[in-house]
Image (tube, rainbow, N blue to C red):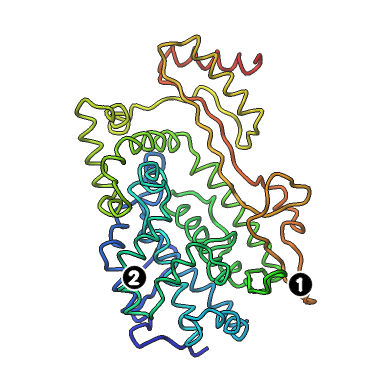
Amino acid sequence: MNRDYLSENDVPTQRVRCPVHGFIRYSKNERKLIDHEVFQRLRHIRQLAMEYLVYPGAMHTRFEHSLGVMEMATQMFDTLERQHREQIQDDLKQVPELREQTMPKARQLVRLLGLLHDVGHPAYAHAGEKGIPGQDHEKVSIYVIQNVLSALIDSIFFQGASGLLVRLMEKSPELAFLGQLVAGELDADRADYLLRDSLHCGVAYGLYDSAKLIESLTLIKHADTGRLQLALHRGGEHAFEAMILARYQMNTQVYLHKIRRLYDHYLEEYMKLWGPEYYKDLGDVLKHDDMSVMQEIRKDAAQVGPRQIWARRIVDRRHHRVVYETGDNADQPKLQKAKRILKELQKHYENTDFFLDDSPVPIYKLSIPGDQEEQQVEDLYIQQRNGGRTLLAHESAIISKIPKRVRTVRIFAEAEGNLLKAIRSDAANLERNV
């Protein structure tokens, strides 16, 4: 397909090597954003915070992940364009800013959304959010686009581009399927980070057939709004099932690893104290990265103050130990049981520091037969060969068996040696009796 670009400077003539995607190509205009200091800051924000304490190879950053999301979102868009160019044009021409040069603008927006979706991440990524105003990195990303990059984006791409990006991040229904490509149940964000995190952690849990998944994408019209939304061709459901299973396994084996959870907890508690002093507004988030905050942590570890205990735990690796934990699918009764066990342990060991870690993480948000727990975020359909459609979660035998969330409840204690053995023994006895 001959592709139209907004200008000669939007043709992807430059490239960078990527261990996941091979080469990632970008244009001279995109290079201006990539070279901007707010995007370069992402080179110093690790994708998985302090996961490297468990998996030493997990040193990759939000910088290369953002490039990867841009690449995968582009592949997804191109797959859809080959099938539905006229439908996409008709749908997007309803947006005033996209009436002219509809397809080049839409494709560029998808690339920019992938590139900039994480530009507002604070130091130490999600663990660091506890210290920022509003505790939401997406609000910082929107702030960056509106207050730092808007003039640059509008001048080098097209007028109104920055505003459309903000509306995409805010999930405006008029741009629904474009936003789904980066933030949805089947999106380039998780499609990239599962492969990338798996590679750098040295595990195989996050692997799935990404090429098949992208090639299986299609579009259908929403039954109520008439707007386009993502769907899968018949046969693509197996690749989607594999991605959901990869997400489940990466959470149980990597993201919710007990040491990762411990240091996320220490970082969160430290940032709750440090953030209000240094993050007066959203713009202050851009002044710091993992390196600058670690300097502050080291400084606080060496001097008396309210942040010292958390700083020393991080610097000296003086961490708690697990004395009780549930399986990966703890329900509310198991959580309540863990709380009762914790209460009894605290009575018997008054001078020991305990804390309970409850870490529910959503795996997918689709409705499944008989599920009354929550409303679905979006419906994902299979496009049948005869023109009909069925809900994937209602048809897939595998999706309905994968838990919608992972929840591991753990009790940690600051103890070693004989004390640790005694507490673990008591916790085991309490589990049988409380």
Label 1 crowd bin: few (<14), some (14–19), many (20+), radius 10 Å: few
Q: Residue at x 28, y 30 (%)?
A: 307
Query: How far from the left and from the top, in percent, is residue 80?
Result: 59, 77
Residue 428, above or below 186: above
Nearest the eye: 83 or 374: 374
| Image location of residue 412, percent across then percent down | 47, 25
What amino acid type should be assigned to the residue bearing mark 1?
Answer: Gln
In the rendered image, the vertical position of residue 21 relative to residue 313, given as above or below: below
Q: Quadrant of residue 8?
A: bottom left
In terms of depth relative to the viewer, which is nearer, 229 or 14? Answer: 229
Which quarter of the picture shows residue 429?
top right
Q: Toward which corner of the image does residue 151 lie, by quadrant?
A: bottom left
Front residue of this view, candidates 1 and 35 = 35
Residue topped by disc 1 = 384
Total numbered circles? 2
Tell whether 329 sits left or right of 279. Answer: right
Closer to the chain start, of discs 1 and 2, is: 2
Point out the residue furthest to the top here: 348
Q: Image point 44% across, 11% down: which residue?
A: 350
x then y, percent, for residue 75? 51, 73
Assign a secondary structure to mark 2: helix
The residue at the point 52 percent across, 17 percent down is 424
Residue carrying label 2 = 150
In the image, taking residue 312 as reference, residue 229 lies left or right, namely right
